[in-house]
């Protein structure tokens, strides 16, 4: 039986990993590179999350008890990012591709409250991370079924963070990490049977080290007499290393009937080894508490799956529906990212005015997992400050694909 090929990856991935474990964002898909012939695509993704919680009844950090049982307000900010891919089929056996995306990111901040659990006066605890990636991929196709590929990955990252309030033991801490770059690599292979729209691909991405000159400002309450206010410990710039995690993606697709395909994506990311540990913060907290405090860290690896069905309705229109699951990266989890994975449902539609180009739209709803939030002072323990329940997010995606 011959089944006409229907390319649905551009639909369901337009909102694929917008909200995921830790700071995972794009899902780092390789599928544009596996398109037939010469291909270009450009996309834009938007996420609108709602993440709010309630401080636990016995909260008393820093001697503050009035925050107990209080609502945190929505701490998650909406964000958007572009993506693009360009692939050339140089010969029957060799191809080259370039993939651009924002693989990791974070944008969170606590609303100003009367009780200073995570805010202080007009200042609030907040964090932003922006990461960009450009993958250059060389592929070798010994025949129409196999594709072996590998290449370097250039990644940039920058971020800033501010800690305020009793939840962080009244430390006033500011960190700015200017944009720096690091280089890693990817490798993988794919197998396809075009006649039945079968495609399977496995892609590995390496860790990437970033040596960042972080500028840190620290103030602490007077250790002998807190009534005297804050002691300014100054501003320093020291080099710290942040390593973005290794990962594996498995992509599957197969025709199941005329003009209908089933697809699946499985992803593993090694978040359990990820740390953001600014040097000055580590030195100071070791002196104060006997243990270095990480600005961000996770206890578990991420496992995620997305499965669905796509169907071509006519010459111009096709659509898809998908279900997704993400394990999260541990619980309790950081106060600036307090969710544990998700369940999701997504819808996609593709309009092809002509055989060589198309426009895809995606919509995805995320039911975010409940989580206990803990500050860096409690990482590695069961202690937590607040519980976040019944949160959700909406993701939106737009992609334009062109074959030439």
Image (spheres, grey):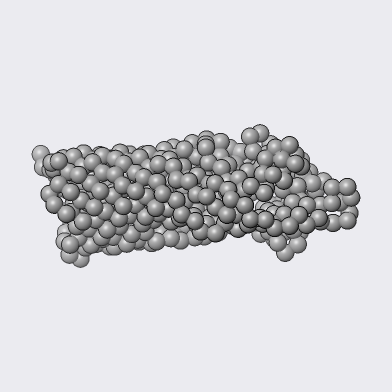
| Residue depicted at x 21% and y 42% | 147
Q: Quadrant of residue 148?
A: top left
| Residue depicted at x 43% and y 56% | 132
| Residue depicted at x 67% and y 49% | 280
Relative to 398, is 162 on the left or the right? right
Q: Quadrant of residue 261?
A: top left
Q: Is residue 8 above or below residue 254?
A: below
| Residue 53: % across, % down | 64, 49
Q: Is residue 335 above or below residue 158?
A: above
Relative to 312, is 391 on the left or the right? right
Relative to 129, is 70 on the left or the right? right
| Residue 162: % across, % down | 65, 56
| Residue 151: % across, % down | 31, 47
Q: Can residue 297 be seen from the camera position used here?
A: yes
Observer-nearest of 9 and 235? 235
Placement of the C terminus among the 4 image quadrants: bottom left
Q: Can residue 172 be seen from the camera position used here?
A: no
| Residue depicted at x 45% and y 45% | 208
Observer-nearest of 328 and 140? 140
| Residue 299: % across, % down | 56, 36
Placement of the N terminus among the 4 image quadrants: top left
Q: Quadrant of residue 101?
A: bottom left
Q: Is residue 330 above or below residue 128?
A: above
Q: How many marks?
A: 0
């Amino acid at each position: 039986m011959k089944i006409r090929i229907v390319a649905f990856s551009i639909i369901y991935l337009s909102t694929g990993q917008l909200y995921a474990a830790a700071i995972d964002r794009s899902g780092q898909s390789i599928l544009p590179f596996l398109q037939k012939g010469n291909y270009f695509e450009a996309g834009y993704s938007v996420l609108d999350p709602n993440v709010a919680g309630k401080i636990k009844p016995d909260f008393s950090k820093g001697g503050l008890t009035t925050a107990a049982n209080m609502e945190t307000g929505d701490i998650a900010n909406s964000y958007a990012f572009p993506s693009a891919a360009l692939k050339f089929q140089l010969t029957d056996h060799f191809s080259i591709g370039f993939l651009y995306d924002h693989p990791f990111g974070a944008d969170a901040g606590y609303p100003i409250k009367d009780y200073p659990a995570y805010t202080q006066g007009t200042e609030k605890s907040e964090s932003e991370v922006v990461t960009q990636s450009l993958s250059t991929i060389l592929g070798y196709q010994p025949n129409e079924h196999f594709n072996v590929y590998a290449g370097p990955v250039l990644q940039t990252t920058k971020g800033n963070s501010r800690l305020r309030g009793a939840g962080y033991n009244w430390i006033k801490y500011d960190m700015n990490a200017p944009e720096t770059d690091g280089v890693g690599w990817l490798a993988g292979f794919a197998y396809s049977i075009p006649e039945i729209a079968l495609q399977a691909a496995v892609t590995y991405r390496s860790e990437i080290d970033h040596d960042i000159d972080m500028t840190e400002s620290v103030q602490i309450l007077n250790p002998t007499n807190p009534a005297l206010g804050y002691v300014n410990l100054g501003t320093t710039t020291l080099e710290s290393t942040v390593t973005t995690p290794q990962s594996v993606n498995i992509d599957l697709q197969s025709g199941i009937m005329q003009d209908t395909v089933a697809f699946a994506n499985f992803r593993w990311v090694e978040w359990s080894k990820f740390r953001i540990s600014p040097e000055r913060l580590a030195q100071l907290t070791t002196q104060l508490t006997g243990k270095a405090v990480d600005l961000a860290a996770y206890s578990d690896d991420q496992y995620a799956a997305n499965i669905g069905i796509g169907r071509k309705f006519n010459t111009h229109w096709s659509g898809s529906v998908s279900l997704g699951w993400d394990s999260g990266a541990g619980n309790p989890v950081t106060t600036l990212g307090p969710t544990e994975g998700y369940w999701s449902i997504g819808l996609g539609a593709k309009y092809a005015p002509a055989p060589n180009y198309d426009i895809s739209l995606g919509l995805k709803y995320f039911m975010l997992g409940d989580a206990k939030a803990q500050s860096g002072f409690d990482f590695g323990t069961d202690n937590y400050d607040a519980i976040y329940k019944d949160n959700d997010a909406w993701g939106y995606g737009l992609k334009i694909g062109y074959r030439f």
